[in-house]
Amino acid sequence: MADRIVKVGVIGCGGIANQKHLPSLHKLPNVQLVAFCDIIVEKAEKAAKTYGTPDAKVYEDYKELLKDESIEVVHVCTPNRSHSFITIDALEAGKNVMCEKPMAINAAEAKKMVEAAKRTGKKLSIGYQNRFRPEVQFIKKECDEGNLGDIYYAKATALRRREVPTWGVFLNEYEQGGGPLIDIGTHALDLTLWSMNNYKPKFCVGTTYEKLKKEVPSGNAWGEWDPEQFTVEDSAFGFIVMENGATVLLESSWALNILDPREACTTLCGTKAGIDMNNGVRMNGIRQGRRYSLTPDLKAGGADFYEGVGSGSPSDMEAALWIDAVINDKDPVVLPEQAYCVSQILEGIYESAKTGKPYYFNEEN
């Protein structure tokens, strides 16, 4: 990366900012965290003290932060409902924006974000850091090299046994737009579509459930939830058919009676081989008329998947490659059009669950 300094402002200084964005940005030598904003100003003050430059500024109103012309990049780490309008305002103010997933609370708002990025010419990316896990990088490369052949069946998995987030606004339908589907299902769907390089959905059928959220005591890993405050689904499932005939199953849950919970995982089946993420990466197929399975050792090192970026956590790689894209005027790894497709499908599953009918995608959705 070039030596020039990129000044960054962060809007929303809650859990995801402090657990992911701020620590990773703080490690980059060419990044200065110069502005922090939160409606609870104490959170912004604490983040500024921990990660900011000595003269970092603190704001309660994000629009005041956007007036600072020295800020080149803004990270949006607020609840889902405010993703779109804050991102659009930041783009219009001449900032490049990394917005935390999901892209927006619905597809219409996500589309506005894509249009704003095109209109302003600024860069926009969405925080799908699971793309940077070694196992996902291996799978993506196998797919890109054609080693799976025509991928016609896939499963995107994000299933927890009893791990319902009881903090923040995760259980609030108004603020979040949904529960596990939009929270963790979005990661599994993103890495699945990205691996397949297939962003043309035809129709989907979805179901959502509220079967366990009234059940207390719950055995939840993160403490008891208040059933009255739990206004989103506890599980959601989707059957997605792509324009080329490929089928994708999406399964997501915060609370499910299951002994094999797995999160942000994919299974891909092609005409030449299949691959999954069950206790690591497993690849299978037929060679010389014999069935084979392959389990790569992803702890043994190997070449970097991205030139100039060494090993590190997925969040660290996400931050480094994002800043590199800004400095060197390259496309970010996560394109806004790709994230918009994910939002379209999530909305389609929710709509199908409400109506009991298939949801068809077209240019108007």
Image: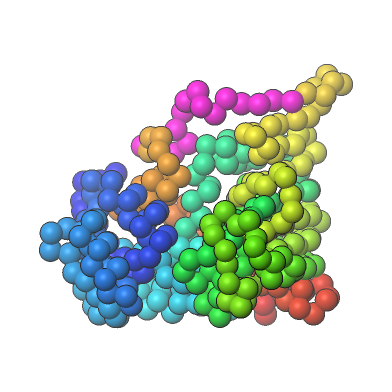
Up/down of 306 relative to 327, above or below: above
Vertical comparison of 173 with 130: above or below: below
Q: Who's the residue at 34% across and 66% down the image?
A: 13
Residue located at (51% from left, 41% from top)? 133
Q: Position of residue 136 (x, y in %)?
A: 57, 41
> Residue 357, located in which quarter of the rendered image?
bottom right
Q: Residue furthest right?
A: 289
- Frontmost residue, 9 versus 259: 259
Determine the main secondary structure of the stretch shown in magenta: loop
Give the answer, above or below, for where 278 lies relative to 92: above
Location of the C terminus by quadrant is bottom right
- Is residue 202 on the magenta stretch? no
Q: Looking at the image, which residue is at 40% across and 76% down?
A: 86
In-front residue for pair 72/349: 349
Q: Nearer the viewer, residue 22 or 218?
A: 218
Residue range highlighted in magenta: 293-308
Q: How many marks?
A: 0
Asked whether residue 117 appears in the rendered view, the answer is no
On the rendered image, what quadrant is the N terminus found in? top left
The outermost residue toward the front is 217
Q: Quadrant of residue 143?
A: top right
Residue at the far left in the pictured view: 55
Q: Residue at x 30, y 68 (%)?
A: 43
Q: Is residue 99 visible?
A: yes
Relative to 89, 226 lies left or right:
right
Asked which colour scheme the image uses, the reply is rainbow
Q: Position of residue 218 (x, y in %)?
A: 65, 60
Q: Give x and y (percent) for residue 37.
A: 29, 72
User: Residue 128: percent from the left, percent from the top?
Assistant: 51, 55
Please state if 23 lies on the left or on the right of 365 as rendered.
left
